[in-house]
Image (tube, rainbow, N blue to C red):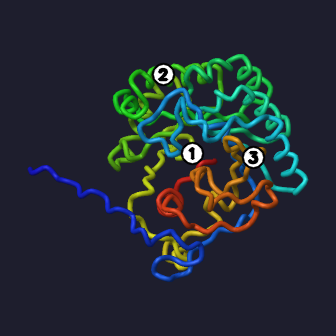
Amino acid sequence: MSRQVLAPPRPLDPAKFRDPVTTAKGERRATVALRGLQTLWVNTGTLCNIACRNCYIESSPKNDALAYISAAEIRAFLDEAASLGAPLREVGFTGGEPFLNRELPEMLRDVLGRGLSALVLTNAMKPMMNHAGALLALREEFGDRLTMRVSLDHHEAAMHDLERGEGSFAKTLEGLVWLARHDFRIHVAGRAAFGGGDDAAMRQGYAALFSAHRIPVDASDPVALMLFPEMDAATDVPEITEACWGILGKSPDSLMCASARMVVKRRGAERPAVLACTLLAYDPRFELGATLAEASRPVALNHPHCATFCVLGGAACSR
């Protein structure tokens, strides 16, 4: 049998994703209104202890384009959400590696102390373990309202290490096992493309790994084990029009930007900014203001990631 050769992806049409109101074909571009702020994301800073081959935000040990945000700055946004009467239920922390920000435990305590849930996206390596004592105290006091989502790109070391560096799988697995041993609520994030499109086989592989190491994650649960689509803004994808909602049988309320915003602090900035999306930290078109109130306006789906990740890929960063 001859070997199938896949055609390379088509480059993005430069006429697409330019106008926030209309598409390249002159159709009305889809927008998403904020129906209620349920999830507030915080980028703790883009510095990371490792450099992955394909990081959507280009995190590395040298990239500090997004500076460390402080606990006091996040407290101000939590206070604003409360004063606005926002239906906030969860605060998610991403990076970079969030545990490189030394004020993360204080931020978590503030969030959890308000009766909210907290979600931390981590590689579960040394930076996390440097905060082991603080994490155990939070787990003891707040229980399952704290969720640790660990990035494990594949259930086999070779594939994971291809993306994140030799030996990284073993270190992340060690952190996962530590979290499991201490009864933390754990989720795992993998990469769908690493499975060659075979979602069932990927989940079976993860299930075997979790079982072997007594990690209490249900691999069949798409929230407990999220397999994210790959994102390449240079690859051609369709623009999302107002007509797409009916064609796809999808509601704009199901997208992340209908219920979430993200706070970042740019290097050299006097104060943080609020963005429409966790995936578009560097695109000025998705910076909505300095406050949650300013950031409550609708979002035009004017980026390839809007199509690939959210509308067509069906992915979501929060629970």
Front residue of 192/288: it is 288
- Which mark's residue is nearer the viewer, 2 or 3? 3
Q: Is residue 92 visible?
A: no
Q: Which residue is mark 3?
A: 272
x, y percentage for residue 194?
A: 37, 42
x, y percentage for residue 214?
A: 52, 23
Front residue of 268/213: it is 268
Packing grade of label 1 (10 A; few <14, some 14-19, many >=20) is some
Q: Check if mark 1's residue and mark 2's residue have beta carbons within 8 Å.
A: no
The disc label shown at residue 213, or none: 2
**Amino acid type, label 2:** His
Packing grade of label 2 (10 A; few <14, some 14-19, many >=20) is some
Exactly how many numbered labels are in the figure?
A: 3
Marks 2/3: CA distance?
A: 40 Å
- Which mark's residue is nearer the viewer, 1 or 3? 3
The disc label shown at residue 208, or none: none
- At x 38% / y 27%, what residue is drawn? 157
Marks 1/3: CA distance?
A: 29 Å
Q: Check if mark 2's residue and mark 3's residue have beta carbons within 8 Å.
A: no
Does residue 15 appear left or right of residue 311 in this picture? Answer: left
Residue projecting furthest to the bottom: 26
Packing grade of label 3 (10 A; few <14, some 14-19, many >=20) is many
The disc label shown at residue 223, or none: 1
Does residue 287 appear left or right of residue 246 in this picture? Answer: right
Of the numbered discs 2 and 3, the one sitting upstream in the chain is: 2
As helix, strand or loop, the secondary structure at mark 2 comes to: loop
Residue 298 falls in image quadrant: bottom right
x, y percentage for residue 170?
A: 44, 21
**Amino acid type, label 1:** Val
